[in-house]
Amino acid sequence: MNYFRRGQGAATWVLLAALTAAGTTASARQQPGTERAPGESAAAGQAVQPDKGQAYYHFTLGHLYQERGTLFNRPDLLSKAIEEFKLALLYDPASSFLGMELADLYAMTGRWRSAMDEAEQAVNRNPDDAEARRLLGRLYLRMLTADRRQPATADLQQRAIQQFEQIAEKYPRDSGSLLILAQLYRVSGENTKAEETLKKAVALDPNSADANTQLALLYVDLGQYRAAIELLTKVTAQNADPQVLSSLAYAYEQVRDYKSAADAYGRALERDPENLAFRKALGQSLLYSQQYDRALEQFQVAVRANPRDAEAFLRLSQIYRFQNKFDLARENLDKALDLSPDNQELQYNQVLLAEAEGKLPEAVSLVRKILDSPPRDGGTAYTPQDKTNRGIFLEKLGTLHRDQNHFAEAADAFRQMIALDGEVAVRGEARLIETYQENREYENALRESERAVRQHPENRELVMTRASLLASTGDTAAGVNLLSSLLKNTDEDREIWLALAQVNLRGKQFAPAIEALAKAEPFSQSDEEKSYIQFLYGSVWERQKQFEKAEGAFRNALSLNPDSPNSLNYLGYMMADRGVRLDEAVSLIERALERDPNNGAYLDSLGWAYFKQNRLDLAEQYLRRSLERVPNDPTIHDHLGDVYYKIGRIREAQQEWKTALEQWRRLPKNEIEPDEIARIEQKLKEANTKLAQETPEPRR
């Protein structure tokens, strides 16, 4: 709290010399008994009579020492300044102003405890001095936040809060004090009071960047990202501070609106172009929003700026992997591993690269190698972070086994997750239930899901997994009731409404499915979220054979997210199955496969489209590849049987159709399609007849 401005150096020392001379005269007027012994502290003398002139003299001298000490980085002059301020207080002990100046100086020199003590005395001298209380509150806040490693005492927190509560009560329109009070509430974990206080500050000045930003950041901490985005969007429209833009981008990331996050990071980078953290965050959001070429540019700049940045090489590898440029992906991943060979994230990306290339046994070997490594600290026990990472690796091991139809090995991996407890165990439960369901072990799946939900009744993932299973096995109403219990009338309801739509779709309850999607729509903000809603609308219409409506919905989905593989595949397959616009159908499905080259459903779609075009060699090739990924799907066996029949391989066609019938009959009743079964049975009859006609009768 400085009431003087720094003057020119020469003039300051002229004034200092004059004051020193004047001080000699002033000293002569001191009361007897107040003289200091040589070397005695200036503030250590006996009590003196109040003297405003002496107080002004010592304050001015101290202030000059403070200026010179600050200018020339002279701690000895700052110490002299402190002594002079103490003397000034001796001559004017009722001055809260002098106490605050001394407290400021203590704070400047890092003597926070002394600063706080002096500020407390200033408040005691004049309890109505709002400035003294503000200073004391700021010092408390500084003490509370100075060292995160040392927990602040509850006493210190409450003393700080009390100071600013009194200021807020006496000066309710003092928005600055309200902001500090809100910070103090947040430090002490009183988030409800912090929110109320910040709302008061915003009401005083609706355009205050500080108040709106603090409130938005509180919402971020509370997980209320939509509210944070609304406030930060308003703030950044007026004051595009790079750090505030970064906070806005972070909030967008949390709601998975990566396109908007990239826009915000891009604006932050424009204002701070040398900030490498902003550049890498921009690149990552571009990567997640599938803007691969733009993401590539950002990380190429990053590795040029720092050729030893392993993370930047990793991101380059990931981009090339998503572009199916596997050689470049491996080259950049190897560079990252050369820089950080023990980094488990890099090792895990080796697993993901092998998986993307379709090298599933190699991927299994790589993830097992990671799992066999000891805890990173060299001990025998896993830290919480180690357990979290181990859960990720076990989950990938299980899914890799499941993708190869090694269901027993997959179940074993997921049981190991369950043994780790916590959130990892919950994910393991969900994956184990899905594995039982995929392997048609419905009794095991129902039993395991019932136990898991009973143990974790509020866990959304487990409840949604069981609800889907119930719908598949014929109890749609129970699945709907289970999900409905999770509705809270908040933004988080979107996830539940989508699950309700899918459960009703599984149960062929089409009208309730449409109603649930309509409920989810208002909660869908990003293009990706809106696109998924349209995709589900298309799925519902297609199941009802309302193909024009379905096509319209799928095209709406693609207008919002042009590279959505699900929408590309479903629209392409629907067109191929009906035998319309086959060239476009093939093109759409090929685009889906570019995004996910080893997806069994997409491979089946392309094979079926080629069959419709009478390109039978290609049809057989893709359908056989599809069965390598999904060997138990009755539709794929049916399609391959049709190919064999058309090229005259009747016995092979018969075998595929028989397998298709077996797989249809293993499905739960809600997923069985009687019309499809009847159609395959008819084809088998025709094949039997044809074989009988072609087989010559034995000679008598």
Image (tube, rainbow, N blue to C red):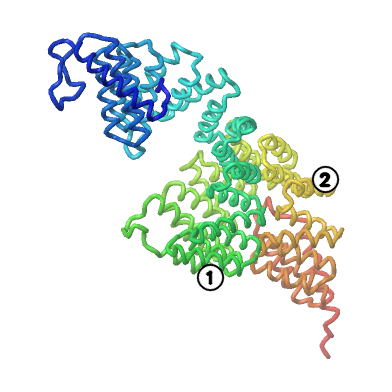
The relative height of residue 115 versus residue 338 in the rendered view (above or below) is above
Q: Quadrant of the C terminus?
A: bottom right
Front residue of this view, candidates 501 and 280: 280
Q: Are marks 2 and 1 in contact (CB under 8 Å)?
A: no
Residue wearing tag 2: 549
Q: Position of residue 687 (x, y in %)?
A: 81, 72
Q: Position of residue 470 (x, y in %)?
A: 61, 46
The relative height of residue 675 versus residue 689 in the rendered view (above or below) is above
Mark sitting earlier along the chain (2/1): 1
Residue wearing tag 1: 362
CA gap, disc 2 and disc 1: 44 Å
Please name the amino acid that badge 2 sits on: Lys
Front residue of this view, candidates 663 and 516: 516
Q: Residues within 10 Å of mark 2 (few under 14, many from 20)?
A: some
Drawn side of residue 484 relative to residue 140, left or right: right
The quadrant in which residue 354 appears is bottom right
The relative height of residue 670 versus residue 92 in the rendered view (above or below) is below
The quadrant in which residue 204 appears is top right
Q: Position of residue 220 (x, y in %)?
A: 53, 35
Front residue of this view, candidates 57 and 316: 57
